[in-house]
Amino acid sequence: MLAALPWVLHTPYWRGILVVCAMNVMLALSLNLVLGYTGQLNLGQSAFFGIGAYVSTILVKTYHWNFWLAALAAMGAAGLLGLALAAFAVRLRGHYLAIASLGFAVITYQVLLNWESVTEGVRGIYGILPPRGFGSTVALFYLVAGLAFLVYLVLGNLVRSPVGETLRSIREDEVSAASIGINPARWKAFAFGVGAMIGGLAGCFYPGFVGTLVPDAFNIVESFTMMAMVIVGGMGTMIGPVIGTIVLTFLPELLRGFGELRLMIYGLALTLVVLFMPGGIVQAWNALRARLA
Amino acid sequence: MSALLRARELRKSFGGVRAVQGVSLEVPQGAIFAVIGPNGAGKSTLLNLLSGVYQPDSGALDFDGRSLAKLPAHRRVRLGIARTFQKIRLFKQLSVLENVLAGFHIHHDTPFWKYVVLGATGRFHDEARELLEFVGLGARAAERAGALSYGQQRMLEIARSLATRPRLFMLDEPAAGLNAAEVDFLLERLERIGARGTTLIVVEHNMDLVMNVAQRVFVMDYGEPLFEGTPREVQSNSRVVSAYLGGEFA
C-alpha cells in the first residue's frame, strides 16, 4: 500500500507532501517515545531535527563525507545533545521541564542563526542534493518511508519488551519506579537519547528534499507541530502518532481552498480534539468500537 | 539470629521538624519486625530512610554487613530491599499484570539487541501470574491497575514488590483501609512470605496484625525509640500504653 501511494497521489506537489509526511512520521515517533511512553514534557524536539539536518549537510558539502556516514554522525551528534537535554529532565518535571526544553530549542535555533561561519545563518546553504540514487521524489519517498517504517518496527519492539514497562513506570510514578529498582535518571536519558537520534535521522533527509537549508525550518514552532501530531493521534500508543501525522500533514493541504480561513479551521480542529478526545484518535476509535460491540 | 539490617543513631529533620531523632535498631534475619507508634511518630520517615527515599542527616545504616550510606533507593532494591507505600503508588494506567512485570526490572538479563529485533522476549510471565495468584488477583490480570478496589490495589503493590525477590520486605501500613476479611487474608499472606525466609518490617496501626504476626515490636514516639520487645512485653509496658492512650491511663 505504501509503495502504491506515489502513484495514487501522482502530481509532483502531492508526492512532495508524501515525503514530508514520512519525515513527520519519524519525528512524531521520536517524540512519542519521550512524551507518550516516558511521560517527559519535551518541547525541544525541533532542535534535534535541526542538528540532524545541519550536521549531515555540512559534513557532506564542506567536508565531502559520504551521505550515509554523515547521517550516522548526525544521529550521533543529535543523540549526544539529547543526553545533554536529559540532564535537565533528571532534575525537572512537568512544566519546568517544558520550559527548559523549550529554552534548549531556542538556544539551538539561535546557534544555527548566528554561527554564520559554519551554518551560513539566514543566508542559508544552497544547492543541497538528495542522497545519491534517490534523486527523484518517488525514490526519496520510498527511502524515507522505508526508514520511518523501520523506526516504527524498532520502537514498537522496544516498547513491547520489558523496556516498555520500565519507561511507562517512570511516566506513571518515578518514586514507585525507583522502589522496584528502576533508575529513573538512566532511563530518561535513554529515552531522550534515542528520541534525539531518530529526530536527527529525520533531519538528514530534509535538506536534500528542499534543496536549501535555513534555520527557520527548525523554529521552535516545529516542536509544537510534532507535539500536536502525537497528541491528536494518541500518545503512548505506536499507531497513534502515525495517524496524527497523516491527518495533520494532509489536513492543511486539503483546506487550502479556504484560503486564510484554513489556519483557523486547523486550530479549531486541534482544540476540539484536545477537549473532547484527550486520548486522541486512537482512544476515540477504541471507544467507538466498544460502543458498537 | 544475626542482624540483617542494622541502623545506628539515624537522624532526619525537615526544616525545624525533627522527624527521626537517634533511632538505632537491629532487625534479625528472617524475623517479622513491627514498627508501631502514634500518628506523626516518624514511622514512615524511618521507612523512607531505610529504603533510600530519604538520606539521613546523620547515622549509619547497613544491610547484611554492607553500608547503605548514600545508596539511592533503586540501588538498594538490587541488594534485596523492597517496600510498599503508605499511600498506594501503583502504575495506574498500566494493567495489573504489567505492574507485576515491571517489578522484575532488576532480573532482566536479555541482551538489549534482542529487545530491538524480537520485541516481547525474556519476560517473567509465569512468575508474574504466580504472584498474582498468590495475592488473589489471578483473574484480574488484564484490568487497569487503577480500576481495582482499594484492598486489591494494596495486594497488587505487594505482588509488584515481591517481583524484585526481596530478602528484606518493608510494608508501610499494609492493613490501612482494608476490611476485616482483607486483613485476615493479608495476615496469612505475610506469614507465608515470612515463612519463605523473607525478613519483614511492617509499619502498622492494626494491633491484631502486629500482635499476631510480629516476633519483635519496635515502638516510636516523637521521632524517638520508646520501647522494643516481644508483642507481649509491649502490651504490658506502661510507657507504650501511655503514649497510645494518654498519660492518665498509665
Image: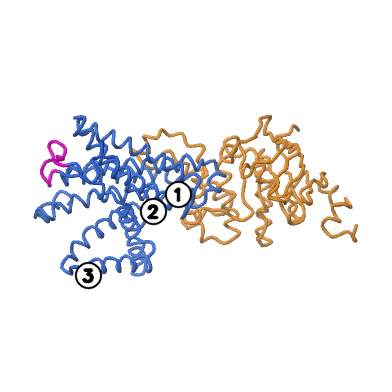
| Amino acid at dot 1 | Arg
Reply above or below: B76 against A29: above
Note the chain letter of the blue one. Answer: A
Residue found 23% across the figure and 46% down from its top:
A122
Identify the amino acid type marked 2: Gly
Q: Is residue A250 left or right of residue A199?
A: left
Q: Magenta part mainly helix, strand or loop?
A: loop
What SS does tag 1 mark? helix
- Crowding around mark 2 (Cα neighbors within 10 Å: few <14, some 14 to 19, many 20+) is many
Palette colour of chain B: orange
The crowding category of the residue bearing disc 3, from other C-alpha atoms within 10 Å (few below 14, some 14 to 19, many at least 20), is few
Q: Chain of mark 2?
A: A
Q: Which mark is residue A168?
A: 1
Proximity of marks 3 and 2: CB atoms separated by less than 8 Å: no
Residue range highlighted in magenta = A126-139
Residue type at tag 3: Leu
Q: B195 and A251: which one is in front?
A: A251
Above or below, B72 against A226 in this view is above
Give the chain letter at badge 3: A
Kindly check if marks 1 and 3 are in contact, taking CB atoms under 8 A apart as contact. Answer: no
Mark 2 touches mark 1? (CB < 8 Å): yes
- Judged from the image, the secondary structure of the residue bearing numbered disc 2 is loop
Q: Choose mark 3 or mark 2, whichever is in front.
A: 3
Q: Residue under label 3, please give it.
A: A261
Query: Which residue is labeled 2 in the image?
Result: A236
Q: What residue is rendered at 67% in x and 58% in y?
A: B176
Q: Which label's residue is closer to the chain start, 1 or 3?
A: 1
Query: Tag 3's secondary structure?
Result: helix
Q: Is residue B13 visible?
A: yes
Chain to which mark 1 belongs: A
Q: Do marks 1 and 3 share a chain?
A: yes
Q: CA distance from mark 2 to mark 1?
A: 9 Å
